[in-house]
């Protein structure tokens, strides 16, 4: 499982969890805030996105812990 952050042009932030073993399909992520396509992928890996920050509910930036 790989984790990465994706930021939309509107400022919304998404956390992406990409599995290297589960089957998925190509697709794209639509921003729940502004409707733009934030990210598109052609790989068949399984991806799950979660909105962690919306522009109207900003929190201070917290540094992620070091990877194990
Ligand atoms: Zn957006």
Image (cartoon, rainbow, N blue to C red):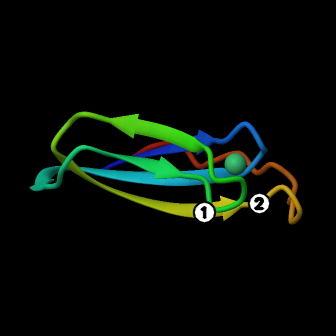
To which quarter of the image does residue 11 belong?
A: top right
> Within 10 angstroms of label 1, few (less than 14), some, or many (20 or more) residues?
some
Asked if the residues shown at circle 2 and circle 1 are in contact, with their CB atoms under 8 angstroms apart, the answer is yes
Q: Residue at x 40, y 37 (%)?
A: 40
Q: Residue at x 71, y 45 (%)?
A: 63
Residue 5 shown left or right of residue 58 in the figure: left
17 shown above or below 63? below
In the image, which disc is placed on residue 51?
Answer: 1
To which quarter of the image does residue 2 belong?
A: top left
Given residues 56 and 35, the one toward you in this image is 35
In the image, which disc is placed on residue 54?
Answer: 2
Given residues 66 and 14, the one toward you in this image is 14
Q: Residue at x 20, y 36 (%)?
A: 43
> Within 10 angstroms of label 2, few (less than 14), some, or many (20 or more) residues?
some
Q: Position of residue 60 (x, y in %)?
A: 87, 54
Q: Residue furthest front?
A: 35
Q: Position of residue 58 (x, y in %)?
A: 87, 59
Q: Position of residue 55 (x, y in %)?
A: 84, 55
Q: Residue at x 32, y 36 (%)?
A: 41
To which quarter of the image does residue 53 belong?
A: bottom right
Residue 35 shown left or right of residue 20 in the figure: right
Looking at the rendered structure, the secondary structure element under dot 2 is: loop
Between the residue at mark 2 and the residue at mark 1, the CA separation in whole angstroms equals 7 Å
Q: Position of residue 18 (x, y in %)?
A: 31, 49
In the image, which disc is placed on residue 13?
Answer: none
Looking at the rendered structure, the secondary structure element under dot 1 is: strand
Residue 19 shown left or right of residue 12 in the figure: left
Given residues 41 and 60, the one toward you in this image is 41
């Amino acid at each position: 499982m790989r984790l990465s952050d994706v930021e939309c042009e509107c400022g919304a932030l998404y956390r992406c969890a990409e599995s290297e073993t589960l089957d998925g399909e190509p697709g794209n992520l639509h921003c729940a805030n502004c409707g733009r396509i934030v990210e598109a992928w052609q790989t068949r890996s399984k991806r799950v996105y979660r909105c962690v920050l919306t522009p109207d509910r900003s929190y201070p930036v917290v540094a992620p812990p070091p990877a194990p």
